[in-house]
Amino acid sequence: MKHSPSDKKTPVTGQMVKLTAADGHSFGAYEAGSAESPLALIVVQEIFGLTDHIRNVCNDFAAEGFHVIAPAVFDRAKADVVLPYSQAGVTEGLELRSQIPSDKTLADITACAKALRDAGHRKVGIIGFCWGGLLAWLTATQTHNVDVAVSWYGGSIGNHVDTAPHCPVELHFGGEDSSIPHTEIQKIRDARPEVEEYVYDDAGHGFGCPERPSFNRDARDLAWSRSVEFLKTHLA
């Protein structure tokens, strides 16, 4: 079955909720889908925050039958962050990211996994985009909180390949992504041949976001279809 998300902004069908990490930090999260859904998924944002695009991704996964939670991981530095898809947005996002130790971000993701399991889900998956793609990889390699992980154009994964993932992982990269060189993609492939890896030759960084100039519908649709099938296979 071919899966394809909506290109246009869809009506918001989810809601903002509050979660608390093990260290007492309270943060916002976008929740979509029902706890009665058979599948559970954490969606991790790009460097731009919980944008309309990320919320629409959550809605699209909810339409595929997932119960979704997307943490506002910038809340540890600044609440309610939504940045523009521009160089200024990238600059501000990187500054905010630098203020948050990765173990604190992983603690927020762990809280999302706990919330989904407390809702009755036996298995939990994760998918991340851009910065979230790296966080999905780190979750799969540094914690035992998820049962399957997918990363779209996650940068710097090549710097974290010494530890094997504890669950099945699928990676998606753009062949024309200037921020993730082919040497890094090959490094991951050499170090972790068990990981499924796809490269979309004519796609750049952020190819899955309709709000970015790099949007590539064909690559997005194929990566989406592969991701949905991979997640459903390992969460069933």
Image (tube, rainbow, N blue to C red):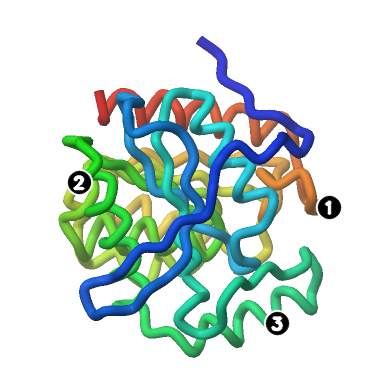
Residue located 62% across and 48% down the image: 174
Distance Cα–Cα, label 1 vs label 3: 17 Å
Distance Cα–Cα, label 2 vs label 1: 39 Å
- Of the image marks 3 and 2, the number of the one nearer the N terminus: 3
| Residue 184 in view of the camera | no
Q: Position of residue 86 (x, y in %)?
A: 81, 69
Q: Is residue 129 left or right of residue 100?
A: right
- How crowded pointer 3 is (Cα within 10 Å; few <14, some 14-19, many 20+) is rated as some
Q: In the image, what residue type sits under mark 3? A: Thr
Residues at marks 1 and 3 touching, judged by CB atoms closer than 8 Å: no
The residue where tag 2 is placed is 118
The residue where tag 3 is placed is 91
- How crowded pointer 2 is (Cα within 10 Å; few <14, some 14-19, many 20+) is rated as few
Q: Judging from the image, what secondary structure is the residue with disc 2 in?
A: helix
The residue where tag 1 is placed is 213
Q: Position of residue 6 (x, y in %)?
A: 70, 29
Q: Judging from the image, what secondary structure is the residue with disc 1 in?
A: loop
Residues at marks 2 and 1 touching, judged by CB atoms closer than 8 Å: no
- Of the image marks 2 and 1, the number of the one nearer the N terminus: 2
Q: Nearer the viewer, residue 189 or 128?
A: 128
Q: Is residue 174 left or right of residue 142?
A: right
- Of the image marks 1 and 3, the number of the one nearer the N terminus: 3
